[in-house]
């Protein structure tokens, strides 16, 4: 998990993005709990200087952290990947509907190789979730979920139709949607 300030959620939410509550629980806690209950081996959280409250929160919970330099999501993720053994599952902190079964399914499909998990952009739109980073492939529009496996083999793409992976919180309306789906 990498943590930025989450400025698209402000001014409605003053907390750092990973600490924004969804259904009374910080998003990062929901993700940590899903990972801990899955077949994933170890859980590390990648934090940056922009997320000091998130870092403190995670350390207080006993989560191992990797302190990245804060040069942006991709650079911080690469920094963390250089410090862990592969294959490694990566999950963003703003995926509040993540469940252990989704993690386990992703690990099984990856089989030790690299895997990018996407959902149809139309699924996000039907749910009312933001689809800021959609892309087209083979005439269909997809959106990354924020759940991936980085391994040594070539990258494969797995299309999931699970609505829980379609809700990646980027806007206040996504927080409301996630809270409604948690209820």
Image: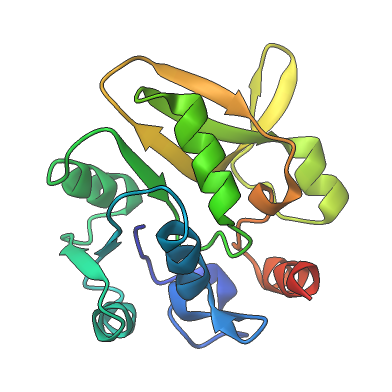
Question: Which percent across, then down, holds residue 7?
Answer: 49, 72
Query: Is residue 105 rendered to the left or right of residue 78?
Result: right
Question: Which percent across, then down, holds residue 123?
Answer: 80, 41
Question: Which percent across, then down, holds residue 33?
Answer: 47, 68
Looking at the image, residue 112 lies above or below residue 162? above
Inspect this view and state whether residue 11 appears: no
**Image quadrant where one finds the N terminus:** bottom left
Inspect this view and state whether residue 12 appears: yes
Query: Is residue 90 rendered to the left or right of residue 141?
Result: left
Viewer-proximal residue among 167 and 164: 164
The structure residue drawn at horizontal position 38% and vertical position 46%, both measured from the top left corner, is 90
Query: Is residue 33 rendered to the left or right of residue 139?
Result: left
Of all residues, the one furthest to the right in this rendering is 126
Viewer-proximal residue among 39 and 149: 39
> To which quarter of the image does residue 181 belong?
bottom right
The structure residue drawn at horizontal position 72% and vertical position 27%, both measured from the top left corner, is 141
**Image quadrant where one finds the C terminus:** bottom right
Of all residues, the one furthest to the left in this rendering is 83
């Amino acid at each position: 998990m990498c943590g930025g300030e989450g400025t698209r959620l402000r001014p409605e939410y003053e907390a750092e993005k990973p600490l924004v509550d969804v259904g009374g629980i910080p998003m990062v806690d929901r993700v940590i709990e899903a990972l801990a209950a899955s077949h994933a081996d170890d859980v590390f959280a990648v934090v940056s200087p922009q997320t000091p409250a998130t870092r403190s929160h995670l350390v207080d919970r006993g989560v191992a952290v990797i302190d990245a330099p804060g040069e942006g999501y991709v650079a911080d993720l690469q920094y963390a990947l250089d410090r862990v053994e592969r294959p490694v599952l990566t999950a963003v902190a703003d995926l509040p509907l993540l469940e252990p079964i989704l993690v386990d399914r992703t690990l099984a499909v990856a089989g030790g190789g690299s895997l990018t998990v996407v959902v149809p952009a139309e699924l996000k739109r039907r749910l009312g979730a933001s689809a800021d980073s959609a892309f087209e492939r083979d005439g269909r529009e997809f959106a990354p979920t924020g759940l991936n496996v980085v391994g040594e083999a070539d990258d494969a793409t797995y299309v999931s139709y699970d609505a829980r992976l379609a809700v990646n919180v980027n806007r206040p309306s996504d927080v409301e949607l996630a809270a409604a789906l948690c209820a």
